[in-house]
Structures are given as C-alpha cells and as structure tokens.
C-alpha cells in the first residue's frame, strides 16, 4: 500500500514571514539504528543489585544501570560472559529485577575487532526491545552495543565490559516548497525523556538517495543550515516523539559555507595550544588538512605517524596541518604529552569534546579520527572517516600536489 505523507501549514500565512516556514508530519517509525545515539551507561558492582533468574552457563557478569533522567526509574541491564566466551545482554523491561521471559541478546566473543560495516550489519539484524516507562505515553526502543572500535581502554579486561545503549528512531516525510518536492529523513531520540536529544537529518530533492549515511557528507543536526539547490533549510524544532518537524526556508545565492564536501569550510576561530589566535580563513591560499582526534581514541593515536609523514612530505609544498584535539577538559595535559612524545610539530587547537559549541560539534564529527582536506580556494574537497579510510586522504593530497 502506498504511504501517504501529510504536509500542513502553520497558524499564519507564509507570505507574512520574512523567512517562510512549514510544519512537516513525519511517519514511518523504524528501529533501524545506524547513527550513534546517547551512550550513557553507568555500571555498578554485580553484588550491589540482585537480579533473579540469571541465565545458566555464565562465567561472570555485571549489572549495569541505564538512567535517562532523574525523573524516571533506572533500567537494569544484565551483561554476562558465557563459559564459551560469548556476550549476553538482557534488559529488565518490566522493572521487576527478574530476567525471566526477557529477550536475550547474544554476541560473538571477538567484540574488540569489529569493523564499522560489521557492527552496522549486526545492529540492523537484531530486534529492538520495547520498554514502557511508568507514566510515559509511548514505548521506547532500545538496543545494546557491545562493540568497541574506538574507546582506548587501559586494559583488555575493561574493554570486555564495554556497553552502549542505542535509542534512536527513524522517520521520513515528503514536502513541497517553491515548486519542488523534497524528502526529509530524520533520525533522533525521543526528547520527552532526554535532556540532550540527539538528532540528525537529511533533506534531498525528490529522486535522490538519502537513506545511507555518508562519511563524506554527514547528516545535519537541529538548527544546522541545509542547502539544497539554492534553497536554505533549517530544522528549527521537532516534537517530543518526533512526529512533527518545524522547518524554515528561503532562497539564497552566493557561496555556501559548511562542513561537507563541495562547501566552503566553516571558519574555525580559536587559540592554539601555545596561546596564539588561530583563524582558519586566514590560511586561504594553502592546502589544509584538519585532523580531529582525541587522547581517548586508539585509532587516532595509531594515525599520528601517518599524519607526521604527510607533514614531512608536503609541509614545504604548501600543506598546513591543523590537529583539533577533542577531549575532556581534564585530559588537556595528557593530550599535550602525546603531542610532545609523537613529535606532532604542526598547528594544534583544543576543544572540549562534544559540547554544543565545541569545534567537533560545529563540524558534525561523529567518527574519530576524521580528516578534512581544504583546497586553496577554501573549499572542502575530501572528508574521511576512520583509520582505514586514511589512504584515500593521502591519495587526494597526492592528486592536489601533482596538479599544483
């Protein structure tokens, strides 16, 4: 049966607004979790909370608490390792601290070595659990994530107990503005119980592909400027359960500044780690490589020698490298020690990891390490994702230098 998407107007005429706006009704709720959601899990000692009907064949386990807010009761999560080395995760969906009749997630043992593609395919294949919190209007969807591709744990034992919880929702809609039909694809978390609602979206012209996330052009976030064929869109707000989206739009002309390929790079104004003022746009006329990394990110540390090699090869040919350290404020000294130890003799700025105004958030960084190449005109010509994509960065720089 053909799905019907409904578009309806707000309470006043669009012509009365300096910037037009519409309200789009979103439909098609799915549980296909692809982007990272809120991953806040606090774990406690297994003897602090008692759960009944623990599965048999368990070598060791922990009971973790997942808290969405202070107003809601904590969700108990059983995380066990079987005698054969497999991982089992069980949500106490009825809050009775009894695991009887609950769904059991079972994962392979080699969770430390999962690649991004394997993780995504596994997450899509497993079902989401419905959890109905007392007093909540609707159920929420949850999935456990035991994979560890990025976090730099001090030892293997800590890495074994790595657990995230995904709670994303997908919705889609069609809408029409200025005589054109557009598709809106929204992924986010239900903000009714999240103090910080994660949200990402695509807007594309009718007929364009948009369901597959792209490492080169990451999804937009709430309040981001989205430019499609000369029309500027902004997702101003969404309803608590993501049923509606309020969108403003206007026609634009001139250069487009952003953080995606084929856009002119959004400016970065900050202080370097040595205290000098840094302005990205002042470097126009040079090739620029921006490296987003963190001291907590094992692949980021592995990448440093490759970046050092690029600096040695191309520094005298007009390449400027900027490393943006994305870390917690208390980790600044650790980051500085890595910079010194690894002889990272290029520009560095520090940004507090994943804060609303942090540089990594402004550049929509969700994959670490990420490398962004900017040409002499100031336009982004390549954006990589992860350690294994970095050989494309070198290839792109080789092409640019040969054409110079």
Image (cartoon, rainbow, N blue to C red):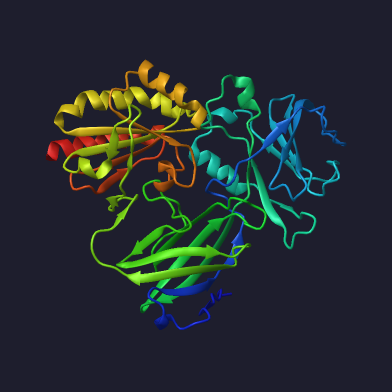
**Toward the viewer: 102 or 297?**
297
Q: Is residue 377 visible?
A: yes
- Total of numbered circles in the picture? 0
Query: Residue 284, position in %: x, y?
Result: 19, 43
132 up-or-down from 364: above or below: below
Query: Residue 49, position in %: x, y?
Result: 82, 33
Corner quadrant of residue 180: bottom left
Q: Is residue 357 left or right of residue 277?
A: right
140 up-or-down from 333: above or below: below
Residue that appears at 59% across and 30% down = 111
Residue that appears at 63% across and 62% down = 241
Corner quadrant of residue 279: top left
Query: Residue 143, position in %: x, y?
Result: 65, 46
Residue that appears at 64% across and 21% down = 157
Q: Is residue 171 left or right of residue 251?
A: right
Residue that appears at 74% across and 63% down = 137
Query: Residue 326, position in %: x, y?
Result: 44, 34
**Toward the viewer: 208 or 77?**
77
339 up-or-down from 103: above or below: above
111 up-or-down from 380: above or below: above
- Placement of the C terminus among the 4 image quadrants: top left
Q: Is residue 89 left or right of residue 119?
A: right
Q: Is residue 127 visible?
A: no
Q: Residue furthest top?
A: 341
- Placement of the N terminus among the 4 image quadrants: bottom right
């Amino acid at each position: 049966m053909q799905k019907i998407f409904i578009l309806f107007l707000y309470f006043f005429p669009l012509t009365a607004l300096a910037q037009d706006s519409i309200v789009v009704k979103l439909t098609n709720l799915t549980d296909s979790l692809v982007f990272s959601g809120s991953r806040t899990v606090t774990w406690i000692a297994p003897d602090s909370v008692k759960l009944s009907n623990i599965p048999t064949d368990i070598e060791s386990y922990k009971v973790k608490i997942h808290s969405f807010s202070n107003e809601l009761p904590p969700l108990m999560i059983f995380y066990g390792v079987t005698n054969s080395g497999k991982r089992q995760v069980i949500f106490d969906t009825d809050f009775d601290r009894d695991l009887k009749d609950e769904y059991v997630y079972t994962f392979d043992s080699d969770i430390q070595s999962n690649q991004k593609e394997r993780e995504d395919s596994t997450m899509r294949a497993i079902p989401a659990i419905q959890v109905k919190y007392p007093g909540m209007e609707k159920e929420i969807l949850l999935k456990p994530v035991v994979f560890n591709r990025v976090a730099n744990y001090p030892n293997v034992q800590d890495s074994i107990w790595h657990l995230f919880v995904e709670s994303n929702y997908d919705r889609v809609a069609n809408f029409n503005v200025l005589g054109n039909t557009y598709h809106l694809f929204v992924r986010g978390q239900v903000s009714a119980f999240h103090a910080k609602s994660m949200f990402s979206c695509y807007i594309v012209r009718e007929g364009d592909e948009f369901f597959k996330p792209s490492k080169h052009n990451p999804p937009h976030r709430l309040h981001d400027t989205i430019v499609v064929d000369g029309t500027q869109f902004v997702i101003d707000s969404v309803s608590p359960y993501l049923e509606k989206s309020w969108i403003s739009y206007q026609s634009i002309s001139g250069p487009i500044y952003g953080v995606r390929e084929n856009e002119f790079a959004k400016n970065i104004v900050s202080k370097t780690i040595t205290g000098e003022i840094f302005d990205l746009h002042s470097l126009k006329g040079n090739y620029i490589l921006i490296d987003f990394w963190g001291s907590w990110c094992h692949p980021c540390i592995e990448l440093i020698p490759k970046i050092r090699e690029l600096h040695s090869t191309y520094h005298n040919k007009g390449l400027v490298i900027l490393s943006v350290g994305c870390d917690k404020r208390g980790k600044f000294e650790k980051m500085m020690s890595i910079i010194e130890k690894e002889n990272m003799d290029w520009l560095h700025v520090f940004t507090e990891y994943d804060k609303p105004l942090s540089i990594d958030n402004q550049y929509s960084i969700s994959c670490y390490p990420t490398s962004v190449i900017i040409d002499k005109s100031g336009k982004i010509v390549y954006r990589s994702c992860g350690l294994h994509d970095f050989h494309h960065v070198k290839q792109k720089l080789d092409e640019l230098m040969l054409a110079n």
